[in-house]
Amino acid sequence: MFQKGDYIEQVSIDCVILGFHNKQLKVLLPKLKALNIWTLPGGFIRQTDSLEEAALRILADRTAIRDIYLEQFMVFGSLERSSPKLMKSLEEIHKESIAEAGLVEADFAWLQRRFISIGYYALVDIHKVVPLCSELDETCEWYDINELPPLAFDHADIVTKAIEHIRLMLNHKLIGFNLLPETFTMKEVQDLYETILDRPFRRNNFQKMILDLDILERLEKKFTGAANKAPFLYRFKKMS
Amino acid sequence: MFQKGDYIEQVSIDCVILGFHNKQLKVLLPKLKALNIWTLPGGFIRQTDSLEEAALRILADRTAIRDIYLEQFMVFGSLERSSPKLMKSLEEIHKESIAEAGLVEADFAWLQRRFISIGYYALVDIHKVVPLCSELDETCEWYDINELPPLAFDHADIVTKAIEHIRLMLNHKLIGFNLLPETFTMKEVQDLYETILDRPFRRNNFQKMILDLDILERLEKKFTGAANKAPFLYRFKKMS
DNA sequence: GCAAAAGTGTTGTAATTACACCCATGG
DNA sequence: CCATGGGTGTAATTACAACACTTTTGC
């Protein structure tokens, strides 16, 4: 449990963990126990952790993978964003485990104060992730970006801002490939780009555009068993 | 003076205030009294202020202008960025005014802890700004981006990141015009773009590019007294 | 052989870059 | 009338979008 003093007060980190499957962007969202509310996976910053380390710890707790592509994108700090009411409910629900740990209400007063939240997004290969529940979670699952369940605080805004940021950066930093598996077909890349940018591309022009970037290497063909020509597989070039 | 409790602890805001003059980007930097060190204008976040409000307050204190273009660009939170040593020196230098205010050392212990800093940049018309000193400052002046004096903490990094961010956003959001006066010539715009992007443009092509954006209105000519054709003045279009 | 999906080449158009010329101004 | 800097038009180049055709695969 969180103990005052070990952490920086009134500051949290919220992570928008994104994956890609079935032509759709998915976000990993834990559902709070005994409440019909979902949150972004979040946490606090230890006095001994840098921001990056804190964010990676939060991610490792929920996805059990390392080498995650992670980027800070915005700080959220309006006065209205906090919700002491929800925090109170949470405390109520978990009062047993709180008592077991020998803690009293005063130890949690700080959780009801205003919080500033640093937004990070993580781009992961959805097939590599095994979602993990924390003590506070009832479930932890992937949700389609366009069909989000009810989110606590301003977390829906945070998701929106994360996606806007990614959309803006997509052509600039080649971050998209973090959402794909180790090897992939050109169609998968195209589907990804079409989903994120929300517009169609022509197959041949898209292929030219991507290959001209000179960042992919072509591997053997992939036989899917479908009644059509087998597409090539590609892999991100190792930089030497 | 800063009193514990009124502010969010261990979080600060640092502002990179940028102006443009003489084909060069300038940053407004206060010099600390009795030390050969400069800092970014910074401050803390009141419990009753949103981040934006806090940043605007900090800016108003140094520039005495309102309607400032302001943008959050990054959070700095490594463990090494703080410097209790410098904070200690500062306290030493100002012990008289601290005593006058009836405060004791314990009131300032929190300033020596680790700090996370939220970076904002402000783009201003350098001619409208009258730099103001705070109690802690000896001077507060504009410095060329390429000739920065010694900066405290990681403030030199913060300046670098701010400029990288602006360079990236320049074509995307038309933020550049915030650095120019109310009315300006096309050459001034070109100088600005060339300085920020660090590359030359052809005069006529640049003019076409900018005018095609359909954001400027042409005013009367500007007679400078120079031995050449008088250039047109332009103004940012009022959006209706 | 056919449908489906992938690979590749070729054309046309739009955007960008480069070059050229003319005009106003003060000394 | 000349040097300087500003305005504008047009040609050349390049990048991008659109179209067409060929190949591979399983049934």
Image: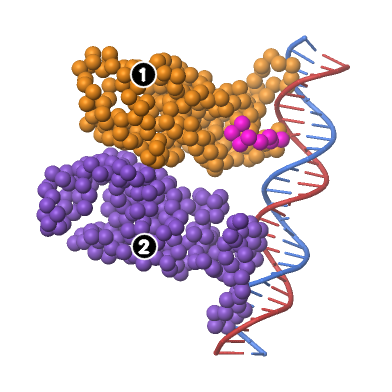
Chain colours: A orange, B purple, C red, D blue
The vertical placement of B221 against A181, above or below, is below
Name the residue that disc number 2 marks. B64
For mark 2, does the 10 Å Cα neighbourhood hold few (<14), some (14 to 19), or many (20 or more) residues? Answer: some
Secondary structure of residue under mark 1: loop
Q: Nearer the viewer, residue B13 or B171?
A: B13
Q: Nearer the viewer, residue A130 or B42?
A: B42
Is most of the magenta stretch helix, strand or loop? loop
Q: Where does the image place residue B32, in percent across and percent down from the top left? A: 24, 59
Whether residue B32 appears in magenta in the rendering, the answer is no
| Badge 2 amino acid | Ala
Residue A113, quarter of picture: top left
Residue A208, quarter of picture: top right
| Badge 1 amino acid | Leu
Residue sitting at 31 percent across and 21 percent down? Answer: A91
Residue sitting at 49 percent across and 25 percent down? Answer: A150
The vertical placement of B75 against A203, above or below, is below
Res A36 seen here: yes
Secondary structure of residue under mark 2: loop
The vertical placement of C21 against B104, above or below, is below
Name the residue that disc number 1 marks. A136
Residue sitting at 47 percent across and 52 percent down? Answer: B166
Q: Chain of mark 2?
A: B
Residue sitting at 54 percent across and 83 percent down? Answer: B225
Relative side of C6 to B65, left or right: right
The vertical placement of A121 against B47, above or below, is above
Residue A57, quarter of picture: top left
- Residue B66 is marked as none
Res A126 seen here: no
